[in-house]
Amino acid sequence: MSSVSGLSKPSKDYPETIDPQAVLDELQFVHEQLADSEKASEYIAPVETRRKLQELEHERTSWEVAASVFGTAFIGSMALSIVGLLGLALAWKPLTRIQKLSRLIKLIETLLEAFEDLGVEALPLIRVPDLQPIDLFVRFPGKEFLLFAVRSFGESTIVYNESKQALYYKRGRKGSKRWEPDPMQELSDQAYWLRKNRRELFGSSKGVRKPMAKVVVIWGKTQLDQHRDHLYAKVGDQKFLFIPRERGACYVIHQSQVVEFTRAYLVERQSKLLVNN
């Protein structure tokens, strides 16, 4: 008689009948439960990017109405009277907000057009205590993350000063001035806060430890100057301005490079994953 059949009968060593198949089934059940638990720990709640985009558009419309009201008050005064100046001052904030929202709407639309089939998700204007809101957190399936800060400085040119480890802006022949507040430092502080306080966006502790590209996007008429070769990092098969400073390294690109950079970054990350596996 085999040892297995011997276990199917009670004895002084095994007072209760043991069903080998039941034991195997139980082990399989435990295995499946552990697997489901592991999957659950990696689960990331989806971001409804299209709905977020509609919310931004609705907010922009509301601010446009407010700007129109205050602008009418200024024009109606027909002079720089106290009422006119008050109307101009009140209209300034809505106009600034409209510009910010318009840039984010355009950025999200650009990313959706290029990467919606890859499941791109975009979460705009994440509030951060004591800091400016995060402009845009971007996530791809497979847990690839990017953090965008959208900045514009009118008709000027942005250049990185290596000795000062800071961005400067130049306008015509007026020389250059330091860009304050420092958008790279703001972005680094936001990234640190995000990993520490919004871990659910990364899915798990493993996701939190994954790389997240920090990207300052120079927008509109503001141009990005040419820099020395050693300041450009290869991403995929292309090169982009990369500032490896101690207070937080980040990429600095122009609006026109958003799709190229994002695509190159995804290729770079997938290549590294294939090598590591």
Image: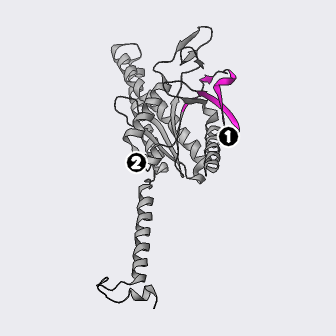
Q: Amino acid at mark 2?
A: Glu
Q: Residues within 10 Å of mark 1 (few under 14, many from 20)?
A: some
From the image, tell me which residue sits under label 1.
236
Q: Quadrant of the N terminus?
A: bottom left
In which quarter of the view is residue 126 placed?
A: top left
Specify which label sits upstream in the sequence, 1 or 2. 2
Span highlighted in magenta in the image: 215-243
In which quarter of the view is residue 10 placed?
A: bottom left
Residue 41, given in percent of the width and then of the height, sits at 41, 56
Inspect this view and state whether residue 20 appears. yes
In the image shown, does 194 or 66 lie closer to the viewer?
Answer: 194
From the image, tell me which residue sits under label 2.
200
Q: At 42% from the left edge and 39% from the top edge, which residue is drawn?
A: 195
In the image shown, does 273 or 94 lie closer to the viewer?
Answer: 273
Q: At 40% from the left edge and 45% from the top edge, which residue is drawn?
A: 199
In the image shown, does 51 or 260 lie closer to the viewer?
Answer: 260
The kind of secondary structure element at disc 2 is: helix
Residue 129, given in percent of the width and then of the height, sits at 34, 32
Q: Amino acid at mark 1?
A: Gly
Q: CA distance from mark 1 to mark 2?
A: 29 Å
In magenta stretch: residue 184: no
User: Extreme bottom residue here?
Assistant: 1
Inspect this view and state whether residue 72 appears. no
Q: At 58% from the left edge and 17% from the top edge, which residue is drawn?
A: 162
Residue 57, given in percent of the width and then of the height, sits at 46, 42
The kind of secondary structure element at disc 1 is: loop
